[in-house]
Amino acid sequence: MKKTILVSLIALAGLVNMPLQAGDAGAGANAYNAKGCIGCHGMSGKQPIADYPAIGGKPADYIAAELNKFRSGERNNPIMMPMAAGLSDADVANLAAYLATQ
């Protein structure tokens, strides 16, 4: 019994450290434009309007983590929370993959 529990815990620990879902940069580019991200973050996420961060070229895991914080409410922003709320896990991965290539 103890051995089974130990093996299960080790397996679960491995899942926690799995990398984020790999995204499709092409689908992310389409989503970036379709969801209106360009309005605040500019072309390719690198030419934002005043007071909005440049997000193009950031690591995919960073972008995904921040989008997930907005989705969960951990990170509070009245603009980004509703924008991120409707994103699926695949959307997040795709947007992160696209932005990382910019």
Image (cartoon, rainbow, N blue to C red):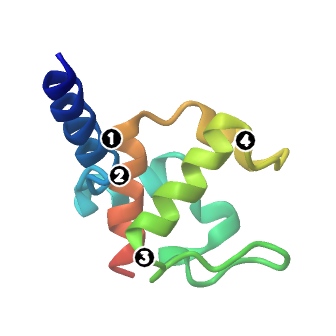
Neighbour tally class for label 2: few under 14, some 14-19, many 20 plus, Cα within 10 Å: many
Q: Which mark, residue 90?
A: 1
Is label 2 in a helix, a strand or a loop? helix
Judged left or right of residue 90, residue 8 is left
Q: CA distance from mark 4 to mark 1?
A: 17 Å
Q: Quick check: 69 above or below 6?
A: below
Neighbour tally class for label 4: few under 14, some 14-19, many 20 plus, Cα within 10 Å: some
Q: Which mark, residue 25?
A: none
Whether residue 36 is visible to the viewer of this picture, yes or no, is: no
Question: Is mark 4 in CB contact (under 8 Å) with mark 1?
Answer: no
- The residue under the point 50% across, 64% down is 63
| Residue matched to label 4 | 81
- The residue under the point 23% across, 24% down is 5
Neighbour tally class for label 1: few under 14, some 14-19, many 20 plus, Cα within 10 Å: some
Mark 1 residue type: Ala
Question: Which residue lies most toward the front here?
Answer: 2
Is label 4 in a helix, a strand or a loop? helix
Q: CA distance from mark 3 to mark 2?
A: 12 Å
Question: Is mark 2 in CB contact (under 8 Å) with mark 1?
Answer: yes
User: Horizontal and vertical percent for residue 101?
Assistant: 33, 79
Mark 4 residue type: Met
Look at discs 3 and 4 and give the one toward the viewer: 3
Is label 3 in a helix, a strand or a loop? loop
Q: Earlier in the sequence, mark 3 or mark 4?
A: 3
Q: Quick check: 84 above or below 50?
A: above
Mark 2 residue type: Ala
Judged left or right of residue 47, residue 88 is left
- The residue under the point 26% across, 52% down is 18
Q: CA distance from mark 2 to mark 4?
A: 17 Å
Q: Earlier in the sequence, mark 3 or mark 2?
A: 3
Q: Which mark, residue 59?
A: 3
- Give 43 or 17, whichever is nearer the viewer: 17
